Amino acid sequence: MSSPTDADKERLDGHGVEAELLADWRVMFAALHARFRTGDFATGLALVDAIGAAAEAANHHPDVDLTYSLVTVRLSSHDVGGITRRDVRLAREISEAAGGLGATADPGGVSVTELALDTHDRAEIMPFWAALLGYQTSEGDDRELVDPDGSRTTLWFQESEPRSSEGVEQRFHLDVRVPPEVAEQRIRDAVAAGGTMVSDDRAPAYWVLADAQGNRACITTWLGREG
């Protein structure tokens, strides 16, 4: 097993990750994500075994989900709260193992959904939701509650005012994180399905959309968030 060096612990932003040319992987919040289409369960299980062997050798362990025809992998360095060169190296090994087994990467299919709660005072209500869900405050952002095991959806508290004057009183909404190259097509599809564009003022960080009844949701990317 190898131990991380200081250089290994350097946190990479989205631009730094893109410079590594990881064709199979996409930055989703503070982690690298990949999906591999295996076609059958046996191939998926073989890929999980290969990932496990590589992870043990590197002493750096990803989160892995196995379904009948898909293997989904999330890589992050928890000691720095983000993506490092350790993750990049292991991502390359995983991609090589997947290719050797005939699995096909599906980077455009990667996404992460967060649940956002609109509130004028998050401190007043966050303890309740933490207790109710068995969550804890995120180390990286004190506006978030996260599952300690990392398997359930993040709950994010967004400072906002009621919008009853617009005819919709909405407290919860979805934030859907997608790869940057997928965002505009996802927006076009949502508008074609009866939605409207509410605001693109913060694009490409996020776009605010609404369904035909005024319920809002956001398409988000890692771009436009520097600093």
Image (cartoon, helix red, strand yellow):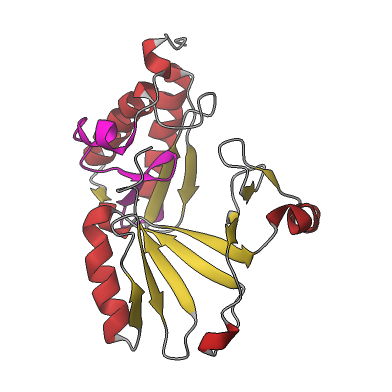
State the extent of the magenta-drawn residues as a range.
13-41
Report if residue 27 lies within the magenta region: yes
Measured as percent of width and height from the top left, residue 207 is found at: 35, 66
Q: Is residue 75 above or below residue 122?
A: above
Of residue 73 and residue 218, the one placed in the foreground of this image is: 218
Query: What residue is rendered at 35% in x and 28% in y?
Result: 12
Query: What residue is rendered at 48% in x and 43% in y?
Result: 64
Decide if residue 168 is in sight here. Answer: no
Q: Is residue 81 above or below residue 141?
A: above
Report if residue 200 lies within the magenta region: no
Of residue 57 and residue 2, the one placed in the foreground of this image is: 2
Q: Is residue 166 left or right of residue 106?
A: right
Of residue 85 and residue 162, the one placed in the foreground of this image is: 162
Q: Quadrant of the C terminus?
A: top left
Q: Is residue 131 left or right of residue 117?
A: right
Write down the quadrant of residue 122 in the picture.
bottom right
Query: What residue is rendered at 30% in x and 28% in y?
Result: 93
Q: Is residue 149 left or right of residue 13?
A: right
Decide if residue 183 is in sight here. Answer: yes
Of residue 65 and residue 160, the one placed in the foreground of this image is: 160
Measured as percent of width and height from the top left, residue 186 is found at: 28, 70
